[in-house]
Amino acid sequence: MTSNDQLPERSSIRQVVAASFIGTTIEWYDFFLYGTAAALVFNKLFFPTFDPMIGTLLAFAIVCVGVMVLRVRAPNAKRPFKTPFVWVTAPLGIVMCLFMISFLPFDTFLRLVAWTVIGLAIYFLYSSKHAKPSPYAVKAE
Protein backbone atom coordinates (compact mmCIF):
# COMPACT_ATOMS: atom_id res chain seq x y z
CA MET A 1 0.00 0.00 0.00
CA THR A 2 1.25 3.45 -0.80
CA SER A 3 0.86 6.47 1.38
CA ASN A 4 -1.81 7.87 -0.98
CA ASP A 5 -4.00 4.79 -0.40
CA GLN A 6 -3.92 5.35 3.36
CA LEU A 7 -5.11 8.98 3.26
CA PRO A 8 -8.82 8.28 2.74
CA GLU A 9 -8.71 5.59 5.42
CA ARG A 10 -7.10 7.94 7.97
CA SER A 11 -9.54 10.67 7.04
CA SER A 12 -12.53 8.39 7.57
CA ILE A 13 -11.11 7.23 10.90
CA ARG A 14 -10.73 10.85 11.98
CA GLN A 15 -14.33 11.54 10.99
CA VAL A 16 -15.56 8.54 12.96
CA VAL A 17 -13.53 9.58 16.03
CA ALA A 18 -14.77 13.19 15.78
CA ALA A 19 -18.40 12.10 15.34
CA SER A 20 -18.12 9.66 18.24
CA PHE A 21 -16.62 12.35 20.46
CA ILE A 22 -19.35 14.86 19.58
CA GLY A 23 -22.10 12.28 20.03
CA THR A 24 -20.72 11.12 23.36
CA THR A 25 -20.41 14.70 24.58
CA ILE A 26 -24.02 15.48 23.65
CA GLU A 27 -25.22 12.22 25.20
CA TRP A 28 -23.30 12.90 28.43
CA TYR A 29 -24.72 16.42 28.63
CA ASP A 30 -28.23 15.09 28.03
CA PHE A 31 -27.78 12.37 30.67
CA PHE A 32 -26.29 14.83 33.15
CA LEU A 33 -29.04 17.43 32.62
CA TYR A 34 -31.98 15.03 32.84
CA GLY A 35 -30.37 12.94 35.59
CA THR A 36 -29.90 16.04 37.70
CA ALA A 37 -33.48 17.16 37.04
CA ALA A 38 -34.81 13.69 37.89
CA ALA A 39 -32.85 13.58 41.14
CA LEU A 40 -33.57 17.12 42.31
CA VAL A 41 -36.97 18.07 40.87
CA PHE A 42 -38.93 14.97 39.94
CA ASN A 43 -37.95 13.06 43.04
CA LYS A 44 -39.77 15.53 45.29
CA LEU A 45 -42.57 15.99 42.77
CA PHE A 46 -43.51 12.33 42.32
CA PHE A 47 -42.27 10.83 45.60
CA PRO A 48 -42.73 13.54 48.26
CA THR A 49 -42.41 11.20 51.25
CA PHE A 50 -40.37 8.39 49.70
CA ASP A 51 -37.41 7.21 51.75
CA PRO A 52 -34.87 5.45 49.49
CA MET A 53 -32.96 4.18 52.51
CA ILE A 54 -34.98 0.96 52.74
CA GLY A 55 -34.03 -0.07 49.21
CA THR A 56 -30.35 0.61 49.80
CA LEU A 57 -30.23 -1.24 53.11
CA LEU A 58 -32.22 -4.14 51.70
CA ALA A 59 -29.85 -4.35 48.73
CA PHE A 60 -26.86 -4.52 51.08
CA ALA A 61 -28.53 -7.29 53.09
CA ILE A 62 -29.34 -9.26 49.92
CA VAL A 63 -25.73 -8.94 48.73
CA CYS A 64 -24.54 -10.31 52.08
CA VAL A 65 -26.88 -13.28 51.70
CA GLY A 66 -25.70 -13.80 48.12
CA VAL A 67 -22.05 -13.86 49.15
CA MET A 68 -22.76 -16.55 51.75
CA VAL A 69 -24.85 -18.60 49.31
CA LEU A 70 -22.09 -18.49 46.69
CA ARG A 71 -19.55 -19.64 49.28
CA VAL A 72 -21.67 -22.74 49.91
CA ARG A 73 -22.88 -23.49 46.36
CA ALA A 74 -19.65 -22.66 44.51
CA PRO A 75 -16.80 -22.77 47.01
CA ASN A 76 -14.10 -23.11 44.33
CA ALA A 77 -15.43 -20.46 41.96
CA LYS A 78 -12.99 -17.87 40.69
CA ARG A 79 -13.45 -14.62 42.61
CA PRO A 80 -11.84 -11.30 41.72
CA PHE A 81 -11.84 -10.31 45.39
CA LYS A 82 -12.19 -12.05 48.73
CA THR A 83 -14.50 -11.10 51.58
CA PRO A 84 -12.59 -11.22 54.87
CA PHE A 85 -14.17 -13.38 57.57
CA VAL A 86 -17.24 -13.99 55.37
CA TRP A 87 -19.04 -16.03 58.03
CA VAL A 88 -18.76 -13.10 60.44
CA THR A 89 -18.90 -10.11 58.09
CA ALA A 90 -21.95 -11.16 56.07
CA PRO A 91 -24.25 -12.08 59.00
CA LEU A 92 -23.25 -8.89 60.82
CA GLY A 93 -24.02 -6.92 57.65
CA ILE A 94 -27.45 -8.52 57.41
CA VAL A 95 -28.22 -7.90 61.10
CA MET A 96 -27.08 -4.27 60.95
CA CYS A 97 -29.09 -3.54 57.78
CA LEU A 98 -32.24 -5.12 59.23
CA PHE A 99 -31.66 -3.25 62.49
CA MET A 100 -31.49 0.09 60.65
CA ILE A 101 -34.51 -0.82 58.49
CA SER A 102 -36.53 -1.45 61.66
CA PHE A 103 -36.31 2.27 62.54
CA LEU A 104 -37.85 3.47 59.26
CA PRO A 105 -41.47 4.70 59.18
CA PHE A 106 -44.23 2.15 58.61
CA ASP A 107 -45.43 3.68 55.33
CA THR A 108 -41.99 2.94 53.89
CA PHE A 109 -42.64 -0.77 54.43
CA LEU A 110 -46.02 -0.51 52.71
CA ARG A 111 -44.40 1.09 49.68
CA LEU A 112 -41.68 -1.56 49.69
CA VAL A 113 -44.24 -4.36 49.64
CA ALA A 114 -46.30 -2.68 46.91
CA TRP A 115 -43.31 -2.02 44.63
CA THR A 116 -41.91 -5.49 45.28
CA VAL A 117 -45.19 -7.10 44.22
CA ILE A 118 -45.38 -4.90 41.11
CA GLY A 119 -41.72 -5.62 40.23
CA LEU A 120 -42.06 -9.36 40.71
CA ALA A 121 -45.26 -9.45 38.64
CA ILE A 122 -43.56 -7.64 35.77
CA TYR A 123 -40.47 -9.83 36.09
CA PHE A 124 -42.33 -13.14 36.01
CA LEU A 125 -44.83 -12.09 33.34
CA TYR A 126 -42.03 -10.86 31.07
CA SER A 127 -39.60 -13.70 31.76
CA SER A 128 -42.16 -16.42 31.09
CA LYS A 129 -42.18 -15.44 27.40
CA HIS A 130 -38.67 -14.07 26.91
CA ALA A 131 -36.47 -16.33 29.05
CA LYS A 132 -33.38 -17.86 27.46
CA PRO A 133 -30.66 -19.94 29.06
CA SER A 134 -28.23 -17.67 30.84
CA PRO A 135 -24.81 -17.35 29.23
CA TYR A 136 -23.47 -16.45 32.67
CA ALA A 137 -23.18 -19.10 35.29
CA VAL A 138 -20.96 -19.57 38.29
CA LYS A 139 -18.72 -22.52 37.52
CA ALA A 140 -16.61 -24.17 40.15
CA GLU A 141 -13.09 -25.02 39.11
Image (spheres, rainbow, N blue to C red):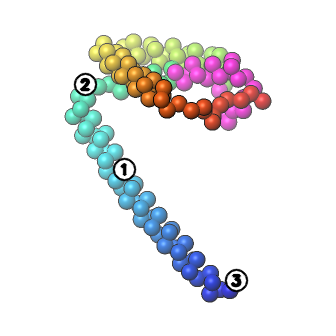
For marks 3 and 2, the one nearer the N-term is: 3
Q: Position of residue 41 (x, y in %)?
A: 24, 40
Decide: is 8 above or below 138: below
Type of amino acid at the residue the image marks with label 3: Met
Res 38 → quadrant? top left
Res 57 → quadrant? top left
Which quadrant holds the C terminus?
top right
**Range covered by the magenta-colored residues:** 62-83
Which quadrant holds the N terminus?
bottom right
User: Badge 1: few (under 14), some or many (20 or more) residues near its Cα, within 10 Å?
Assistant: few
Q: Could you say which is closer to the camera, residue 137 or residue 108?
A: 137
Res 122 → quadrant? top left
- The residue that mark 1 highlights is 31
Callout 3: helix, strand or loop?
loop
Type of amino acid at the residue the image marks with label 2: Thr
Q: Position of residue 86 (x, y in %)?
A: 65, 20
Whole-angstrom CA distance, mark 3 to mark 1, is: 43 Å
Q: Could you say which is closer to the camera, residue 33 or residue 97?
A: 33
| Mark in the foreground, 3 or 2 | 3
Callout 1: helix, strand or loop?
helix
- The residue that mark 2 highlights is 49
- The residue that mark 3 highlights is 1
For marks 3 and 1, the one nearer the N-term is: 3
Type of amino acid at the residue the image marks with label 1: Phe
| Mark in the foreground, 2 or 1 | 1
Whether pointer 3 and pointer 2 mark residues with C-beta atoms closer than 8 Å, the reply is no
Residue 136 seen in render: yes
Whole-angstrom CA distance, mark 2 to mark 1, is: 25 Å
Residue drawn 28% across and 15% down? Answer: 107
